[in-house]
Image (spheres, rainbow, N blue to C red):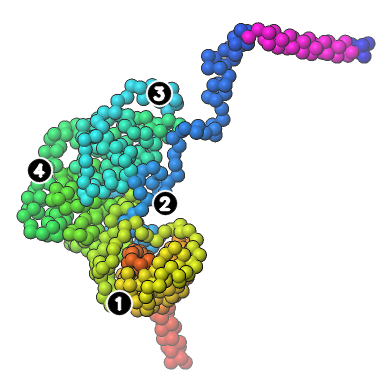
Amino acid sequence: MLYNKDMRILKNIFYTIMIIIMLVCAAGLIVALSPGLSDTLSKLLYGEEGPEAYMEKHAAVDKVDENAVMEAPANSQGIAAGVLASEEGAGYVAPVRSEVNLPDKVNGKSGYESVNGANEMLGDEQADILGESLKTGETGDDLTFDRSMYPYYHLLNAKMQHIYRQIYANAQALNESFAPVEKVTADQLKHVFEAVYNDHPELFWLDTGYSCKHRADGECVEITLQYNRTAQNLAQSKDEFEKAAKSILNNASAKSTDEDKELYVHNALIEKADYATSSSMNQSAYSALVNGDTVCAGYARAFQYLMQQLNIPCYYCTGYSGEDHAWNIVRIGDKFYNVDVTWDDTNPATVDYFNKSDAELVGTHVRTGMSVYLPVCGDGSETEGEGESYLDGGNVVAGITLNPNPTQPLDWVPDDEKDKRPGTFVSGNDIYDLNAAGLTEDMVQTTLKKYYANCLKQMVDRGSGQKAFSNVVPKYVLVEVEKSYGTGDYEKGYVNEALKKLEMDHFAIQILVRDLGGNYYRLYHNINTWNDEKEETEESKETEESKETDETKESNESKDTNKN
């Protein structure tokens, strides 16, 4: 009985499966013979967009639209691709950040806050609706910015300059939200906003924060600016700001030279403002000039504004000095200098950080971001053995720096048939002409080994502390030098031995390169070496304590002997 019952159950299951298969086949035949019914079923399953559009819309997230505005990888300074007009800088080489060593009296006197964009990603439908309704506001198409006064603007390519002008014009008009006039990604927008902010201290009502609504591919559809409380009554705030500035400018403008004007502004600003981390709007020039308390950003912005009003080029420079920090670069005559008003506002006030070269600040200030593209600062006093000035002769070529990621050296095959002039030879496609460079053979380090030996000798001869020296190499050696600084081999090549001979523990180095012509280059080395004073003090203390212990022990032993 159980067997027959089981067989009936199996038969029922089999018949059910066969019926389902027959129904599916019949349905497929009906659909195939009736296109209208097929379309109806497609709409029920996929909606009006159809199966192909449905699958594209709901495909895996890693599928890439070939026309999408994807975020490109950033360069070595973290600057997004498609922002800068050129990747070549003015020759600044950043010191090693880990080797920054701050004097106690200025340690902690920073407070710079970088621009901060709040990004929000929208779905395509939301982005389309917003794009249709949002206007561009002020476009700034009629604006121009002088290269000598507004360097960050001229670092940008043409499209990013258009966005820059738009942001500036809308900030002037106090417009909050607007659509970008050019296609720009969220990452690119951050650098453009930073350029506007860094160039224009007069926009004291503009906050460091902004927001960007963008599509999934990064394309920005809405820019929103943020303003501080001074924007609530901007006319009154401007009047207060200009009045405070004039109290300094009236006396400064009476000075006879730009350097005298600069020094007066430096000292007057120190007198007017106090360093205070709790100060409000402390990233603005307003905080220093009107409120009278600020942080490094406020000092630097106020100094920049005052110098601009005196028609003296002055730039807002940001970087690292133990923490995020801001200072200035100023041009006096044809030379550029670093000025850190914040660090000079001590008790008593100083000029320790007034008009300093990059070499003099190599152990304390490290530029970062877009500021590395600002002009190199050198006071012209660093000399080679014969006392030759950095600025004597030759052609200073912007953009020639020691590449942190150099290519492999080329194969230099001499070909003496290409040029028979005295003092010349040919290597590869390059003609090497000592006469054109104003050199003699004994002045040139013709191999990497000779370059290392010359650096070691000059570094040791000059001693510890902040020193400078230079030497000359042909182009083919420069390529090898680039590689050695990119890989760190230069430390084994000469620095470690020099530190050992100088009895120094730490170093920071900056190298500038000048094209002398004839495929020869002069390399200027700005080096700072030092020891950790605290460690030395502790070691000395331990030695002294050990000595005292030994003396006490000997004294006690002597007393015991006398007693006996």
508 on left or right of 9: left
Q: Residues within 10 Å of mark 1 (few under 14, many from 20)?
A: few
- Please give the residue where the numbered disc 2 appears in the rendered image: 76
Residue at (28, 52) in percent of width and height = 317
Asked whether residue 81 is in view, the answer is yes
Q: Quadrant of the N terminus?
A: top right
Q: Are marks 2 and 3 in contact (CB under 8 Å)?
A: no
- Inter-mark Cα distance, 4 to 2: 42 Å
- Please give the residue where the numbered disc 4 appears in the rendered image: 243
Q: Earlier in the sequence, mark 1 or mark 2?
A: 2
- Please give the residue where the numbered disc 3 appears in the rendered image: 128
344 on left or right of 372: left
- Please give the residue where the numbered disc 1 appears in the rendered image: 385
Q: Secondary structure at mark 3?
A: helix
Please report the bounds of the magenta region as a residue range: 6-35
Query: What x and y, as percent, mark residue 24?
Result: 73, 12
Q: Quadrant of residue 346?
A: bottom left
Asked whether residue 496 is in view, the answer is no
- Inter-mark Cα distance, 4 to 1: 51 Å
Q: Earlier in the sequence, mark 1 or mark 3?
A: 3
Q: Mostly what secondary structure, the magenta segment?
A: helix
Query: What x and y, as percent, mark residue 449?
Result: 46, 74
- Residue type indicated by callout 1: Gly
Q: Secondary structure at mark 1?
A: loop
Q: Residues within 10 Å of mark 3 (few under 14, many from 20)?
A: few
